[in-house]
Amino acid sequence: MNKPVSATSLESSDRLGNHAPDIDALLGRIAEGASDRERERVLPFAEIDLIRKARLGALRLPLEVGGAGLSIRALFEIVIRLGEADANVAHILRNHFSVVERLVRRPKDEQHRQWQKAVADGAIIGLAATELDTPKVGNVTPNTTLSADGDDYLLNGTKYYSTGTLYSDYVLVRTADTTATNAAALIPVTREGIELIDDWDGLGQRLTATGTTHFRNVRVKRQEVVFDAPDTGYGIPYSNTFAQLFLTAINAGIARAVLRDATAVVRARKRTFYYAPSEVPVDDPLLQQTVGQIASGAFAAETVVLAAAEALDTATNAFDTDDVNAVDAAHKAALLSAKAKIVADEFAIRSGSLLFDVGGASATKKATNFDRHWRNARTLASHNPNTFKTRSIGQYEISGTPLPAKGFF
């Protein structure tokens, strides 16, 4: 078994323990063939296995239980780089880290400690939460139900947008018992009665397996169920800020990927337009200006994400220490996360388009697959649209109205 990952080694030399791969090498291997995988629709099982073996999913666990003890900000630095390497792989891990943050990082009982150990050993967690027949996304009673079966339960229902679950070892299922009390059940994906279907057909993030999951009389142990409470998991105000900021971090990574590809395209260009101001593309001031715009956008996107991540660190620490100001800190983190989303999404989407201004018509060939950057950024930005965010931000700035405490704020 790998030695425990070290926060110090990660933050100072980008290494995951003495026997684990170098972060740069790991991200490099994930980046290899990322464009080809998406174009040919080759699911990244091998890349997720690399992450599992490196125990990247344990970055937020404490050192004493085999984690890296990283701050949220340090984690999001890596998420941005992972998004640059492969936006699909980064998105696959979003639900894993969200579940770790809610239920696993600070265990409350023996079952929680078992989940924590599984994550420390490399296990990946997926999510099954969304139902298409509910009137609202988020704070509603799920139609997926837990019914008593002796001392345990039977789980029945269908979920959609189960991002990453196809690649995972466990899945967290949002459900409710017969009294309509909301809960989360965390169970192995191999349990009898679970069917995972890779039917996601979105224009972007095509390899995330954001598909349908059926639960048919799945046996769930009583200790595998965590009922919502004010101080636990989904009951904590602004508990979804982490998940929202994670998506924004991936878009910041996409902006970096666009910069990488834009500079490579300009350096490789041999021909230019008849009326171009320079015969040599690398000396063309218009191409230089466009790459400068892309670089500035990537910098801005990364900067706002990490600023919001620092605020989320403050809020998380406040809840961990029962600080009376924890909810206020959580609201600040949600507000900064919403603002970061507006900025990072805009720059990622715009950069994905600007890439074609430096590459010309040849950059639109299917072989380049450069359109994936725009498609992926546009798809990620469509999660919880910016119109809702900007309205709530404006309402707060004008009237002091707090952001919604539930949903993706």
Image (tube, rainbow, N blue to C red):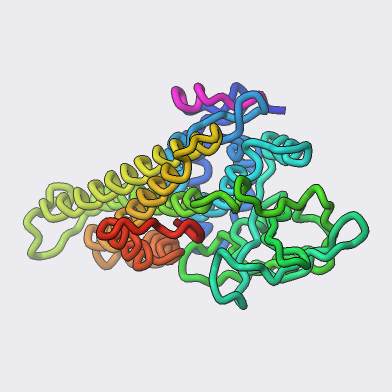
Can residue 371 be seen here? no
- Which residue occupies the foreground of this view, 122 or 285? 122
Q: Residue at x 66, y 49 (%)?
A: 125
Give the image location of residue 84, x and y in percent.
42, 47
**Which of the 4 quarters of the picture holds residue 399?**
bottom left
- Residue furthest to the front in view is 324
Viewport quadrant of the N terminus: top right
* Relative image position of residue 261 (x, y in whole percent): 33, 51
Left or right: where 264 falls relative to 150: left
Up-down relation of residue 143 to residue 390 (above or below): below
Q: Give the magenta part as a residue range.
A: 3-13
Q: Residue at x 53, y 37 (%)?
A: 26
Q: Is residue 154 above or below residue 224?
A: below
Residue visible at 25% across and 59% down in the picture: 398
Q: Is residue 265 visible to the viewer in this orientation of the structure? A: yes
Q: Quadrant of the C terminus?
A: bottom left
Q: Judge from the rendering whether residue 238 lies leftward or rightward of residue 375; answer left or right.
A: right
Left or right of residue 3: residue 71: left
Q: Position of residue 201 (x, y in %)?
A: 54, 72
- 157 or 285: nearer the viewer: 157
Chief secondary structure of the magenta span?
Answer: helix
Q: Is residue 245 magenta?
A: no
The x, y position of residue 354, in whole percent, is 25, 60
Quadrant in which residue 215 is drawn = bottom right
Residue pictured at 84% horizontal, 63% vertical: 154
